[in-house]
Image (cartoon, rainbow, N blue to C red):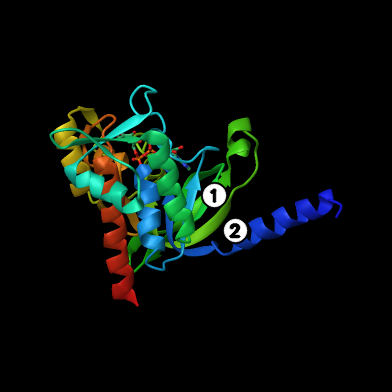
Amino acid sequence: MGLEEVVITEAIMDSYYEKFRSCLQVDIAVVGAGPSGLTAAWHLSRQGWNVAVFERKLSIGGGMWGGGMTWNTIVVQEEGKTVLEEAGVPLILFRDGYYTADAIAATTTLASKACLSGAKVFNCISVEDVLIREDGGQKKVTGLVINSSPVEIAGLHIDPVVIESKYVIESTGHPLEVLHTLIRKNDVRLFTPSGGIEGEQSMWAERAERTTVENTREIFPGMYVSGMAANASFGSYRMGPIFGGMLLSGQKAAQLIDARLREEI
Ligand code: 48F
């Protein structure tokens, strides 16, 4: 059998656009395919929700690939290891409640879990803004404004397109990009003590690991924060290359949104 290049092209076009079309109106749109975003996407999609993940980079995994300072091993503690165990990632006890996992195995397994559970992951797409609506005098995030990352990187003046979502998970990590855009462009108050972004503090792993889970919650109607973005929003600490909090945060975001969506049925 011969190979026809135009058929290959047609297959890619039809398959991609069918995938994209199925995500024009999703239950949950996740911004950022780091550990917290991928965990949230996996846990939500396996509950049967329609989930789309948008990742600016060509690679998924965010800050997890590189372990600490490119030494591609990650550390998780007793609580956090449950998420990796459930995914099937091999863990090694280092000592006294500190476990290590291969960063590549952890990243690829979480990504695989998300995709095989039905989440649609779009790499090379940057979220540049949110869609906003007013309901009874209250503004609410109702979707994402997205563009091709190569368009963004080249600085081309090309308009973005939009997808609608019942909920957005802001999991862009330290830069907290989407929330910064929301607050810069709109006269709104977040569900934080000051009503604005509290900002991230220096490293304190023990406290940061706990608070990143506590701070995982709705920060603005329609928008949840997870992972490092949760601590950066609520003014807590960074934690470095320990990843239990990221995974548990993604899991908590999924549980909270799953409960909300079930209430709304
Ligand atoms: O930074 P990242 O891994 O976020 P996370 O899930 O995990 C944080 C840890 O990796 C580490 C840490 C743990 O100790 O502190 O930093 O909270 O992943 C964030 C992803 O979001 C993408 C970015 O490329 C990365 O892969 N991202 C950021 N802004 C955008 C975006 C955007 N505007 N549109 C699409 N993707």
Disc 1 secondary structure class: strand
Residue 97 is left or right of residue 239, and the answer is left
Query: In terms of secondary structure, where does tag 2 sit?
Result: helix
105 over 162 or under it: above or below: above
19 sits to left or right of 100 = right
Is the residue under label 1 in contact with that under label 2 (CB below 8 Å)? Answer: yes
Q: Nearer the viewer, residue 252 or 29?
A: 252
Gap in angstroms between the C-alphas marked 2 and 1: 9 Å
The answer to whether residue 210 is visible is yes
Can I make out residue 32 in this image?
no
- Neighbor class of circle 2 (other Cα within 10 Å; few <14, some 14-19, many 20+) is some
Residue 138: mark in rendering:
none
Q: Is mark 2 within 8 Å of ligand 1?
A: no
* Amino acid identity at mark 2: Phe
In the image, is 39 to the left or to the right of 208?
right
The x and y percentages for residue 93 are 21, 36
Q: In the rendered view of the protein, which quadrant contains the C terminus?
A: bottom left
Q: Amino acid at mark 1?
A: Phe
Tell me residue 137's x, y (percent).
33, 65
Question: Which residue carries the number 2 mark?
Answer: 20
* Pointer 2 or 1: first along the chain: 2
Residue at figure coordinates x 18%, y 48% from the top left: 214
Indicate the quadrant containing the N terminus: top left, top right, bottom left or bottom right.
bottom right
* Mark seen at residue 122: 1
Q: Is residue 3 left or right of residue 132?
A: right
